[in-house]
Amino acid sequence: MSTETESLLRVRGLTKHFPVREGFRARGAVRAVDGLDFDVRPGETLGLVGESGCGKTTTGRMLVRLLEPTSGTIEFAGRDITHARRGALRPLRQDLQIIFQDPYASLNPRHTVGRIVAMPLQVNGINPPGGIRKRVQELLELVGLNPEHYNRYPHEFSGGQRQRIGIARALALRPKLIVADEPVSALDVSIQAQVINLLRDLQRDLDLAFVFIAHDLAVVRHFCHRVAVMYLGKIVEIGDRDDIYQRPQHPYTRALLSAIPDVTALGPAGRIRLTGDVPTPLNPPSGCRFRTRCWKAQERCATEEPALVPRDGGAQLAACHYPENGPIGVVTSEPVEVSQ
Amino acid sequence: MGRSETVPSGEPDRPEVPEQRTGEGPYLQVRDLRVRFDTEDGVVKAVDGVSFAVERGRTLGIVGESGSGKSVTSLAVLGLHNAKRATITGEISVGGRQLIGLPEEEVRRLRGRDMAMIFQDPLSALHPYYTVGKQIAEAYRVHHPRAGKREARTRAVDMLGRVGIPQPAKRFDQYPHEFSGGMRQRAMIAMALVNDPDLLIADEPTTALDVTVQAQILDLLSDLQDEFRSAIILITHDLGVVSQVADDVLVMYGGRAVEHGSVEQVLRRPQHPYTWGLLSSVPSLHGDADADLVPIKGNPPSLINLPSGCAFHPRCRYADRNGDRSRTEVPELRAAGEAGHLVACHLPAEERTRLYQQDIAQVGVAR
Amino acid sequence: MSLSPVEGAARAEMEPAADPVKPDEQGIVGRSPGQLAWARLRRDRTAMVSGVVLVLFVVLALAAPLIAKLYGVGPNEQFQQLLDGNGMPLGYVGGITGDHWFGLEPRLGRDIFIRMIYGMRTSLFIAFAAALVTTAIGVAAGILAGFLGGIVDTVISWITDVALALPFLIFALAVVPTVGLRFYGPREEVPPAFQVIVLIGIFAAFGWTSTARLVRGQVISLREREFVEAARASGAGLGHMLFRQLLPNLWAPILVAFSLAVPSYITGEAALSFLGIGILEPTADFGRMIFQSIPYLQTDPAYVFFPGVTIFILVLAFNLLGDALRDALDPKSSR
């Protein structure tokens, strides 16, 4: 983990529980996010990957303060913003922005593109040199759109172009960190690559830090410096990209990588097949949450929750009692197919 | 799945889509299918002259982006288009029976019995107010009017077990909302297969699912195909899924077929610049992660106002090499050298091979 | 049973494919959703015809004094000399002549045409005012309930339910005379302006609920949309989110609700006047005209005919325009 002084975003013990009520009585809580620790350094991209229900979107929304954390702290540029009010947050808003998944729902259909991109400037009462219009047109150009399209409406653009408008809006305040929530998963294949390349260029040119939330590990690999793999509200493995993709330690990371159908390999994908679905976060399994689908699970896994710790003193942390240590493609233990 | 690395020996060597051969022909044969919709803004040519065939025990993957006509094609095969809104011409023959022009009632009888469909979103296809088991049993009884309630139930429980749902007898009485996403998709597959259909159309069956569940479902489809020997059409935008389960691939763009051949041919020795673009723009788990992806420039075309000539020419890196032809002349789907490999491109075959080796092979599939 | 949901889903799947992708280049200035709706409305012949009819009615009502001057007959002028001994109009079809286009009222001998013009003015004024007030209240309540949620939503929804549970007619029958008595005593004459305000108040008290419910539902579905979250993530305040982000997306349902509320208040006001608790003599009013004409259904059908047909056309035109407006603003709902 990075030294604490240099991290731009510092998250400790971040937790979000959604209470479930039956009538007026609380009936427990959905533990959507359950104690996350991670750091993002300036200019760094951290990928947050996992299957649906793992809490990655909830995490992203807490980071930009669209959701109130149940507990834990979020420090941004050295300041605790966990429960900051709107007024106190205002100076930091400019540094912290979000890009949404759905290019159709994320743009107000009744506003022109110019108005949409100018919204963060107007809301924060910023009048850039040369005027708002000039700045908006610069932004449109920056994301590869025709600045003359200032007066058009979102319905006149394709999905990929709309996502570019959303990116321009996020860039309007010149942020230092952008939370990108599945920014390409709603786009056509040929458009995905355009948007990934755009984000990469922007990241390099503007030295942006990203928290990149995605379910597609191949996309994350092309965009992120570091990757955190989440399962049922917890980070099960976090580390540098090459470590995660080439020497994954957590069985879940291995299974996830193995399940991706890869064009480069004809025929059925890798050998690891998980059975069943992700358990409900309303009542997660005791001990290690992955144990119900893990082929290596022992008794200890049911009783003792594994800590997220480095195995070999390196920067790669995994929460597993029996981590793998060979390169990808080699599974150290025998049983691959398990029934529940 | 009945994958064969080489082209089947009986494949005829001619530029057209495989014709009906002597003996057992392809179970589904589609010729020159055209589907049009009249809308406020003009005529949408959703499918414009597409031909293909699927044999029993084989899987055809139809690949394309949104608006490429891939879903419209499959709905036409099932006869699910509203006759008032859609104009359908061409030939669709299922098990030797001509579908287009058949009365609605007869198509209905075929649907569910001889051919069935799996949708992307099982929640919208399963009725929320009936138990899953009841819906499967009902689907069975529609086509087996003499089957009793008990027989239908036995059959449904049997199917639920076969698609890998644990405790099928107990699950029979549960409602769709009590199933997880993967289980719902399995239930939907059970419903589609309850009448042993010979043709199964799966429209993005795994797009809404997580990768680990997707892998399970794709395995399940392969296993069931081995067991039932049905012909499968798999519609998807994910080339990874196609490479995993398909025997043949049809690439669609702007309502037309641009490339057609075995999975080996289309994904390993692709001939059309659009296929090249798809392959080189997909992020992969291998190769140089820091290299930029090579996207296809521009946006998918509007079906109302399709570019003239080759619909792909505004986005094609090599369109200039053909002079005006790419703008004026629609390229025909022609043999691309190997048997059974068809491509609709104006570029000469040798040049395509050279360009592929020179520009694509390094960054694309072979990286 | 099992086939129909599958087919339903199949049709739903087909929609995006049939939806045309917008051509990329079509001029630099885009057409707003409102302009597109206007273009669709222009192509709708029913909407155009009913629109023209309505404009005509509104112009007639607004210009009532001017018409009276041109026509040469005032609304309260009596022509007793044109009635027979029983108080029935002389001549044919209720006394239609070149001077009195729609004939005369029996007994009082007032001119029906000019009283209709004035009656229309009363009706339209009350209906428009009531629709404006109810829409304003409904929109405010609906937005607050939908956006803020929680306790605010619970309280507003509860009040809505109470208002819906009160029987409108009984309430109106009880309240209108009581309010008149409370302010003016049994002998005094209640001024027409006061009657109008009481009527608008009655409609407002009951009519805002449907708009509030409609708007609340819309806001709840919009509230979760990502463009609202984007504004929140940029630090936007409540005002910006309500008025800049949400309201522009609510104009369509509000407009439709308004255009359908007006005709219901026209008939509502007529019904109250018919029951004798609406606008009193001598102010001209549609509902009361119909009420007073009913006993003459056999002896003087023209007296019933003209006001009846006019109010029918008026309400029909409003409803047709409202439906056309809904189709134009939301083209998917019509199919």
Image (cartoon, rainbow, N blue to C red):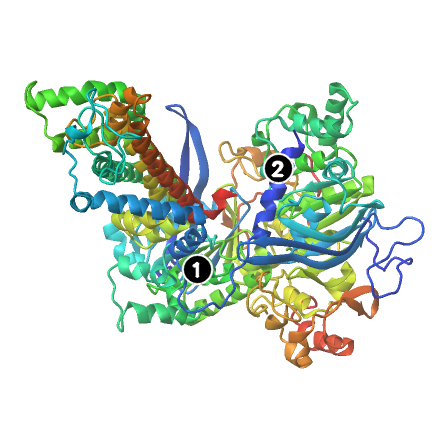
Q: Which amino acid does label 2 sit on?
A: Ala
User: Is any part of residue A70 visible from this angle?
Assistant: no
How far from the left and from the top, in percent, is residue A126? Answer: 25, 63
- Residues at badges 2 and 1 in contact (C-beta under 8 Å)? no
Farthest-out residue, right: B22
Does any portion of residue C187 appear in the rendered image?
Answer: yes
Quadrant position of residue C315: top left
Residue C262 percent across, percent down from the top left: 30, 37
Q: Name the residue under label 1.
A: A210
Q: How crowded is mark 2: few (under 14 residues within 10 Å), some or many (20 or more)?
A: many
Please name the residue that numbered disc 2 is placed on. B125
Provide the secondary structure element on which disc 2 rests.
helix
Chain of the residue under the numbered disc 2 shown in the image: B
Mark 1 residue element = strand
* Label 1 Cα crowd, 10 Å radius (few <14 / some 14-19 / many 20+): many
Residue appearing at x 50%, y 49% in the figure: A309
The residue nearer to you, when weighing B36 against A189, is B36
- Where residue B336 sits, quadrant-wise, is bottom right
In which image quadrant can residue C217 be found? top left
